[in-house]
Image (spheres, grey):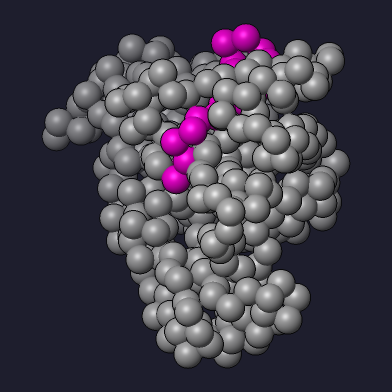
Amino acid sequence: MNLHEYQGKEILNSFGVRIQRGIVATTPEEAVDAAKKLTEDTGTGWHVIKAQIHAGGRGKGGGVKLAKNLDDVKSIANDIIGMMLITPQTPPQGKLVNQVLVAEDVYYPGDSEPEEYYMSVLLNRATGRNMIMYSTEGGMDIETVAEETPHLIFTEEIDPLLGIMPFQARKIAFNLGLSGAAFKEMVRFVTSLYTAYVKSDSSLFEINPVLKTSDDKILAVDAKVTLDDNALFRHKDYAELRDTREENPIEVEAKAAGLNYVDLDGNVGCMVNGAGLAMGTMDLIKESGGEPANFLDVGGTADAQRVETAFGIILKDPNVKAILVNIFGGIVRCDRVAQGVVDAYKNMGDQINVPIICRLQGTNAKEAKELIDNSGMEIISATEFQEAADKVHEVLSA
């Protein structure tokens, strides 16, 4: 589950990570009030107005701007709120900005120049250990840094049993070229950041940039946080932070119906039971000359209502030219699934306007095929993987 910047910062702050303070606003008037409150609390005269969407590169699209007075705050907030913000990480049409973060200006003058670093915490799946990735090249796309100057990217792997050790935090601060008060601040920052990552059950913390201020404070200026959905039962308060406006509406609907659904860009809809079989079905579609339009796992109970709901969700995608139903009857009997497919087809009537290939294998597969073949419905039955692939190819070529 992705979070907005202001939500990620709230989690970081709760674990002792120093952050750039800010207040979220949904209207220009609220933005002005937020700026006044920040001035009272922090003494900041300038403010940074940041669009809050689930995408990076906001500054490149005009979603992050500096306001030097309250008139600027209101004008910039008015421009950003309601805009369709296009960044390298948004769909081509962009994302609607519903709110902004009014943040304090932390690039104030002092004894030294502010410096920006990159830092993230994530799982290294190759080693099964958490990893801190960091670089002196903060504020830039880490992909560009990795491609053009890979020697400027450092990693530190953490033993999950021991957690982050003091020497590792010191090593990170040293590699970033810090000394004195800034060195000690970075050690505390890294330790608290890793603690926040583990205790919040996150799958990604990305801070870009981490800032060393002119008076040697270390703080998070940005925060991209992704929580592990599978651990949200331990964090009811975090689950409430989900912003469905930022998610694919079809995926939101599927989740509410208890279906595991991921929207893709292809032309063949998939309805499968079991994640492994779903992945194999997507490969099957590719081999047949098609492109999977979705990942959809209906689970072990494929009754008429569940199948009908799944059909409805798949057909919301206008690019779907065919639907492949691929069910293995282990716990669930194939004939019951077949009846569910037939009943759903009858109930939906004209809503189904693309060919359906139905492959049922396992318990009572023979009875299931007979039921579909004798239903009078325009459903193409298959029993083998290759047969299903051939049927998909035929309907796409027609």
Q: In front here: 105 or 325? A: 105
Please tell me which residue is depicted at 30% across the width and 26% down the height of the picture.
Answer: 148
Q: In front here: 185 or 202? A: 185
Span highlighted in magenta in the image: 124-139
- Residue 104, given in percent of the width and then of the height, sits at 61, 68
Please tell me which residue is depicted at 72% across the width and 40% down the height of the picture.
Answer: 181
The correct choice, above or below, for 274 with respect to 228 in the image is: above
The answer to whether 369 appears left or right of 273 in the picture is left
Q: Residue furthest front?
A: 111
Q: Residue furthest left?
A: 398
The correct choice, above or below, for 79 with respect to 104 in the image is: below
- Residue 114, given in percent of the width and then of the height, sits at 53, 50
Q: In front here: 54 or 74? A: 74
The answer to whether 361 appears left or right of 131 in the picture is left
- Residue 289, given in percent of the width and then of the height, sits at 22, 24
- Residue 380, given in percent of the width and then of the height, sits at 34, 31
Q: Does the magenta-highlighted stretch encompass residue 388?
A: no
Kindly indicate the quadrant of the structure image that contains residue 157: top right
Please tell me which residue is depicted at 38% across the width and 74% down the height of the picture.
Answer: 83
- Is residue 382 in sight in this rendering? no
Figure label count: 0
Q: Does the magenta-highlighted stretch encompass residue 129?
A: yes
Please tell me which residue is depicted at 40% across the width and 12% down the height of the picture.
Answer: 384
The answer to whether 277 appears left or right of 3 in the picture is left
- Is residue 385 in sight in this rendering? yes
Q: Quadrant of the C terminus?
A: top left
